[in-house]
Image (tube, grey):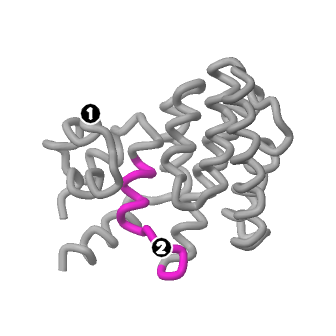
Amino acid sequence: MKLQDVLKKQGACNEARVWVKNLSPEEAYATCERGDWLLWMHGALYPDFHTHPDQVRKRVLVAGLAANLVRNKMTDERSIAAVDAAIAFGMGVIGIDELNEAANAACVAADAAAAAASTDDACAAAYAAKSAAYAAKAAKAARAAVYVGDEAKSADIFRAHITLDEMLNQLKQLNQ
C-alpha cells in the first residue's frame, strides 16, 4: 500500500495526496509539517481500538496535545474537559467510556459555539477539542488546531509520540 493510498483511505485532501506522491515513507514522516496529515496516515494504518488499542491511545494523545495548542481559544469548559480527557486517555489514565462521555459533551459545546456565531478561532478550537476526544477523528483535531495554531508544532508533537518504525512496521504488514 502506497502512502497516497493510505491518505486516500482516510479521506485526506488532494493536496496531501499530491504532496506525498513522490516521497518515501521515511521522507514523508521526516518532512511533513502538518500533524493532521501524519494522523491521517496513522489512522489508516491503525484504525481500530479493539485491534490496536495502544496505537489508538497514542493517536488520541497526539490529537489531545495538538488541540491543547489552541486551548486558550476555547470558550466552553466542556471543550477544555474533552482535551484533558483525550490526553488522559492517551496516557492510560481513563478508559474509552470516559473518553466518549467527554467527546459527547464537547460535541454539544462545539455545536453551541457554531450556533452562537462565535469567532472562527473559538469555533475551530471547540471542534478541535471535540475531535480530539473522538478516537476516530484524531486527524480532524489536529486539522482544527492547525487552523488556529502552529501546524509545524502539531507535526512535532506527532513525531515525539509516534515513531517512524511504528508506521513502517504496520505499512509492511498491510503490504503482505
In percent of width and height, residue 19 lies at: 23, 36
Image coordinates for residue 92, horizontal then vertical, percent: 72, 70
Q: Which residue is mark 1?
A: 15
**Residue 30, position as x, y percentages in the image:** 35, 44
- Placement of the N terminus among the 4 image quadrants: bottom left
Q: Is residue 46 part of the magenta span, yes or no?
A: yes
> Observer-nearest residue: 121 or 55?
121
In this picture, residue 160 sits left or right of residue 45: right
Kindly identify the amino acid type of the residue bearing the numbered disc 1.
Glu
Between discs 2 and 1, the one toward the N terminus: 1
| Image: magenta residue range | 38-51
From the image, tell me which residue sits under label 2.
48
Q: Nearer the viewer, residue 125 or 23?
A: 125
- Marks 2 and 1, how far apart at CA: 26 Å
- Examine the rendered structure and indicate whether residue 18 appears above or below residue 63: above
Q: Quadrant of the C terminus?
A: bottom left
With respect to residue 49, does 168 lie above or below?
above
* Horizontal relation, residue 114 to residue 51: left or right: right
Bin the neighbour count of mark 2 within 10 Å (Cα to Cα): few under 14, some 14-19, many 20 and up: some
Element on which disc 1 rests: helix
